[in-house]
């Protein structure tokens, strides 16, 4: 870890705890900052805040008093989930106080180079796949970020010979100023999180922070098929490495006949790739591009692609029961993810969908409903999904209370060789703390059918 002096005697307010806020507060305290922690949960119910208080950190819980922000404050370190409409954040913005997320802090202390991966869909799969490739190639990768491991904790133990492979959300990237990964990856851009960012333009600009500080010395791996991503990338000084499933990319990665190619060289046959779904070819192209840029041998890449079948909650095969095939795609929290999941199957599909209402309708799903024989909906968006399905001509539509109730009903509606697919097209927060919880409930309900 770099011994930086940036935060010595600086007055820093950490807003929102959870894992990243807790880790950032501890590290800032270690770096000599005057740290104040503010969290909504009352202190008597807040073990995380209590442990910080035991370190001598000033902790104020149970609300967000505006007097915490004044002209004496130097920095706000914000948990990514805290919206910018929060009164404390609004006041800090009025006073031109920098508002950062812990990814910025992680970058500042890290001796290891970062590989940053963002996009509306495919981040977790690509991050995990790349980690496996780097590990197979003895590149000493560490994994961090939105995938579940706090980056500033990982960075404290990394040395210059590691690579920190980091999944980054728009929420995290909105709070960076100097973050400059050695290699950035921008997979795709699809309208999402408008309740947080306000507009699609602001959402895209937040994502683009992944490569805005890069120089000619670094690389940006870009989806050549996404016009919006390419337009945003044009403002970056990084060397562009494009990937495409449709066009030849002599200076990047592409599909060519039965092969995946990189810089004109055949790397792996498509039929040897174990990861299911055509949409995952884009994720393979992105991960392979980064692996080749850092020198992973072809045989290591091929070895991983022959065995890697995906990550939990992302088109995860659960089981086959009486010739019905169950898939858990709980991580599909928007329409693009669900459309890609639906495109992965040609057999009759019973779709389980619904969740948090972010204000959008679901008309964009209609072209992908051809193989859907029945729809089982739940959550805040149930009525919107029913309306879309009726227009799409779906004859069997059922409304249930939750995922747990959806599973036995979906089984009743199914026939042998049907796919029963949880792919909600919505965030889980109306009923569940995380999409992982929702997916686990689905899997448990499937196993109870046995």
Image (cartoon, helix red, strand yellow):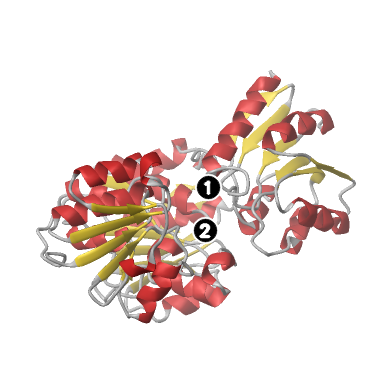
| Residue 354 as seen in the image, left or right of residue 434 | right
Residue occupying the point 40% across, 70% down: 89
Q: CA distance from mark 2 to mark 1?
A: 8 Å
| Res 304 → quadrant | top left
| Residue 54 as seen in the image, left or right of residue 229 | left
Nearest to the observer: residue 260 or residue 201: 201
Q: Position of residue 146 (x, y in %)?
A: 41, 52
Q: Are marks 2 and 1 in contact (CB under 8 Å)?
A: yes
| Res 239 → quadrant | bottom left
Image quarter of the C terminus = top right
Answer above or below: position of 92 versus 413.
below
**Number of numbered discs present?**
2
Q: What mark, if any, has residue 255 been given in the picture?
A: 2
Q: Position of residue 179 (x, y in %)?
A: 28, 67
Q: What mark, if any, has residue 125 been given in the picture?
A: none
Nearest to the observer: residue 366 or residue 447: 447
Can residue 28 be seen here? The reply is yes
Nearest to the observer: residue 124 or residue 206: 206
List the single residue furthest toward the top. Answer: 450
Answer above or below: position of 435 versus 335.
above
Can residue 297 be seen here? The reply is no
Residue occupying the point 46% across, 75% down: 205
Q: What mark, if any, has residue 270 been given in the picture?
A: 1
Residue occupying the point 25% across, 48% down: 153
For label 2, the SS is strand
For label 1, the SS is helix
């Amino acid at each position: 870890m770099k011994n930086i002096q940036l935060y010595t005697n600086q007055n820093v307010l950490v807003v929102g705890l959870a894992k990243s806020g807790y880790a950032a507060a501890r590290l800032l305290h270690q770096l000599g900052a005057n740290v104040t922690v503010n969290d909504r949960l009352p202190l008597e119910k807040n073990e995380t805040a209590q442990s910080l208080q035991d370190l001598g950190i000033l902790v104020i819980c149970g609300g967000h008093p505006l007097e915490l922000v004044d002209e004496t404050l130097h920095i706000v370190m914000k948990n990514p989930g805290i919206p910018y409409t929060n009164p404390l954040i609004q006041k800090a913005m009025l006073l031109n106080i920098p508002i950062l997320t812990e990814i910025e802090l992680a970058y500042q202390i890290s001796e290891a180079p970062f590989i940053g991966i963002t996009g509306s869909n495919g981040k977790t799969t690509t991050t995990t796949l790349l980690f496996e490739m780097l590990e197979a190639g003895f590149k000493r990768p560490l994994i961090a970020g939105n995938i579940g491991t706090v980056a500033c904790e990982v960075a404290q133990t990394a040395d210059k010979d590691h690579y920190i492979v980091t999944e980054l959300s728009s929420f995290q990237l909105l709070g960076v100023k100097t973050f400059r990964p050695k290699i950035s990856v921008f997979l795709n851009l699809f309208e999402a999180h408008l309740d947080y960012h306000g507009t699609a333009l602001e959402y895209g600009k937040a994502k683009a922070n992944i490569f805005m500080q890069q120089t000619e010395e670094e690389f940006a791996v870009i989806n050549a098929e996404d016009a919006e991503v390419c337009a945003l990338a044009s403002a970056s000084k990084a060397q562009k490495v494009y990937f495409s499933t449709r066009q030849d990319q002599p200076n990047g990665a592409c599909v060519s006949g039965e092969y995946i190619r990189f810089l004109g060289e055949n790397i792996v046959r498509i039929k040897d790739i174990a990861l299911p779904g055509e949409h995952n070819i884009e994720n393979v192209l992105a991960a392979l591009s980064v692996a080749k840029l850092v020198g992973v041998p072809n045989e290591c890449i091929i070895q991983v692609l022959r065995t890697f079948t995906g990550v939990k909650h992302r088109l995860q095969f659960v089981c086959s029961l009486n010739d019905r095939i169950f898939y858990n795609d709980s991580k599909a929290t928007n329409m693009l993810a669900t459309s890609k999941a639906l495109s992965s199957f040609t057999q009759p599909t019973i779709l389980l969908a619904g969740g948090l209402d972010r204000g959008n309708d679901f008309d964009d799903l209609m072209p992908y409903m051809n193989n859907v024989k029945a729809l089982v909906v739940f959550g805040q968006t149930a009525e919107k999904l029913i309306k879309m399905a009726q227009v799409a001509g779906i004859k069997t539509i059922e409304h249930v209370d939750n995922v747990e109730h959806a599973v036995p009903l979906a089984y009743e509606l199914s026939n042998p060789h049907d796919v029963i697919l949880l792919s909600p097209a919505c965030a889980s927060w109306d009923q569940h703390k995380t999409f992982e919880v929702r997916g686990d409930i689905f899997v448990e309900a499937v196993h109870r059918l046995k």
